Image (spheres, helix red, strand yellow):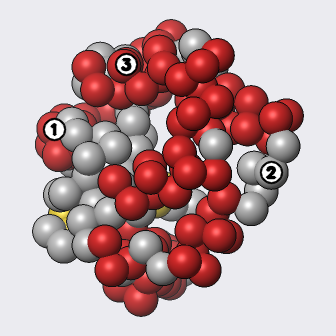
Amino acid sequence: MTGLALLNTLLYPDLDPAVVEFVNALTTPGPREKLTSSRGLADLFRAGLANPAHAADETIEAIVAPFHDDDARLALAKAGTELSLRTFAEIAAWLPKLTLPVRVVYGTQDRILPGVAATMARLQGDVPQALITALPHCGHFLQEEAPDQIGEILAEFYAALGDY
């Protein structure tokens, strides 16, 4: 059986003002270069963590490494700037029709998506079968802050799908 797992994500077209501001910055050449620079990406990663101890140098190097040239940094910016509110509206309309199992995990200290708790509460109303876990010790980058816990949650979810 198929299931859907979501980690700290946007789902609805009504975006938090902080997200809109960030996307707008990515569309402006000066701020875009600053945000997608090695230092900008490292700063964003650190800001997205609930626990700064998870910002190990080797982790930051791995995050920054793929974005070594202007084309790669522009592609990264476009991943945020080309989000479509129309597509989010389509997703929002589709969610209540979902019948497959849904597993959701988010960090309650997410400063990248500050409205994530409200998003997940709304999702619970739209998709009642969704099992949602809020991790109070995590920010936006769940896999870096709680890799074992995330792995266990997802492994358990996908293993259970075989029982359907």
Amino acid, disc 2: His
**Number of other residues with Cα within 10 Å of mark 2, as a class: few under 14, some 14 to 19, many 20 or more:** few
User: Disc 2 and disc 3: Cα gap in Å?
Assistant: 26 Å
User: Disc 3 and disc 1: Cα gap in Å?
Assistant: 16 Å
Give the residue drawn at x 65%, y 70%. Answer: 61
Q: What secondary structure is found at the residue carrying circle 3?
A: helix
Give whichever of 131, 134 is nearer the camera: 134
**Number of other residues with Cα within 10 Å of mark 1, as a class: few under 14, some 14 to 19, many 20 or more:** few
> Where residue 47 appears, x then y in whole percent?
34, 54
Which tag, 3 or 1, sits closer to the chain's start? 3
Give whichever of 147, 30 is nearer the camera: 30
Amino acid, disc 1: Ala
Q: Which mark is residue 134?
A: none
Give whichever of 96, 62 is nearer the camera: 62
Residue identified by numbered label 2: 68
Residue 94 is left or right of residue 18, and the answer is right
Which-is-in-front pick, marks 2 and 1? 2
Give whichever of 129, 77 is nearer the camera: 77
Residue identified by numbered label 3: 20
Residue identified by numbered label 1: 118
Residue 144 placement: quadrant: bottom left
> Where residue 96 appears, x then y in whole percent?
33, 32
